[in-house]
Image (spheres, helix red, strand yellow):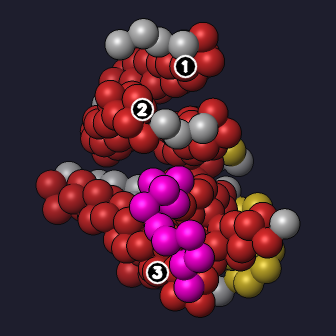
């Protein structure tokens, strides 16, 4: 398979931060994020080896690569004595058990915003010329939210096998699902506006 110049840039960008964070997580013995790196390598490997079939655009591939970097940084960079994932971005709602908006919630919303465009790209050529948009957009949104459920399973597995993780408890998981859904809804709305034009 011949690799295009734009694809080489993506490969180099992703390899730089994956190798850097892998080295860092190995050094500090963070098994949880080493597990996430394995998952990311599987996802990016799937994207790479199916690119000639899926033909994802560069904006989609760069958006997914940016998520990969945000995810790796979230568990490794320390801000005000805590990992970046726990960083309080905007004080929208503070409660004794949770805080909105955290970096973690932003990254979840971002990923499932992007996921709408990933799903749309995969299905658009298999649709009728005039699909029923009142059915299509909710289905795309629910598909992205369903993919988010696999994300939560991936986060849950380390909890089962490791003594300590940074995953958080029930509120964290519930808010992850909420922000997955919010990102997907915003993505579907953005896609709808884009398609109307």
Q: Is residue 167 left or right of residue 106?
A: left
Q: Nearer the viewer, residue 110 or 36?
A: 110
Question: Do the residues bearing badges 3 and 2 touch, measured as CB atoms within 8 Å?
Answer: no
Q: Nearer the viewer, residue 96 or 38?
A: 38
Residue 149 in the image, given as x and y percentages of width and height: 35, 71
Q: Label 1 belongs to which residue? A: 7
Question: Do the residues bearing badges 2 and 1 touch, measured as CB atoms within 8 Å?
Answer: yes
- The reply to whether the magenta stretch includes residue 131 is yes
**Callout 1 crowding tier (Cα within 10 Å): few <14, some 14–19, many ≥20:** some
Return the disc, 1 or 3, that comes first in the chain's sequence. 1
Q: Is residue 76 left or right of residue 148?
A: right
Quadrant of the image for the N terminus?
top left
Return the disc, 3 or 2, that comes first in the chain's sequence. 2
- Examine the image and state in which quarter residue 197 appears: bottom right
Residue 34 in the image, given as x and y percentages of width and height: 32, 35
Q: Can residue 179 be seen in the rendering of this structure?
A: no
Residue 163 in the image, given as x and y percentages of width and height: 21, 54
Return the disc, 2 or 1, that comes first in the chain's sequence. 1
Magenta highlight range: 121-132
- Examine the image and state in which quarter residue 41 appears: top left
Residue positioned most to the right: 197
Q: Nearer the viewer, residue 149 or 52?
A: 52
**Callout 2 crowding tier (Cα within 10 Å): few <14, some 14–19, many ≥20:** some
Secondary structure, mark 2, is helix
Q: Can residue 31 be seen in the rendering of this structure?
A: yes
**In whole angstroms, how far apart are the C-alphas of marks 3 and 2?**
24 Å
- The reply to whether the magenta stretch includes residue 46 is no
Residue 131 vertical position relative to residue 69 in the rendered view, above or below: below
Q: Label 3 belongs to which residue? A: 139
**Callout 3 crowding tier (Cα within 10 Å): few <14, some 14–19, many ≥20:** few
Q: Label 2 belongs to which residue? A: 51
| Residue visible at 63% across and 33% down in the picture | 58
């Amino acid at each position: 398979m011949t690799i295009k110049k734009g694809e080489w840039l993506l490969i180099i960008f992703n390899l730089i931060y994956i190798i850097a964070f892998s080295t860092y997580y190995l050094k500090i013995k963070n098994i949880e994020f080493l597990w996430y790196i394995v998952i990311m390598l599987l996802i990016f490997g799937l994207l790479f080896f199916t690119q000639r079939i899926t033909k994802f655009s560069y904006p989609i591939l760069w958006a997914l690569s940016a998520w990969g970097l945000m995810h790796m940084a979230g568990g490794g960079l320390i801000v005000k004595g805590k990992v970046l994932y726990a960083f309080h971005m905007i004080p929208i709602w503070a409660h004794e058990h949770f805080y909105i908006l955290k970096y973690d919630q932003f990254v979840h919303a971002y990923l499932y915003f992007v996921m709408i465009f990933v799903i749309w790209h995969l299905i658009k050529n298999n649709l009728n010329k005039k699909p029923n948009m009142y059915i299509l957009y909710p289905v795309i949104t629910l598909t992205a939210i369903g993919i988010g459920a696999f994300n939560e399973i991936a986060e849950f597995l380390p909890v089962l096998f490791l003594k300590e993780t940074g995953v958080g408890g029930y509120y964290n998981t519930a808010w992850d699902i909420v922000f997955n859904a919010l990102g997907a809804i915003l993505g579907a709305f953005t896609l709808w506006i884009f398609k109307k034009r």
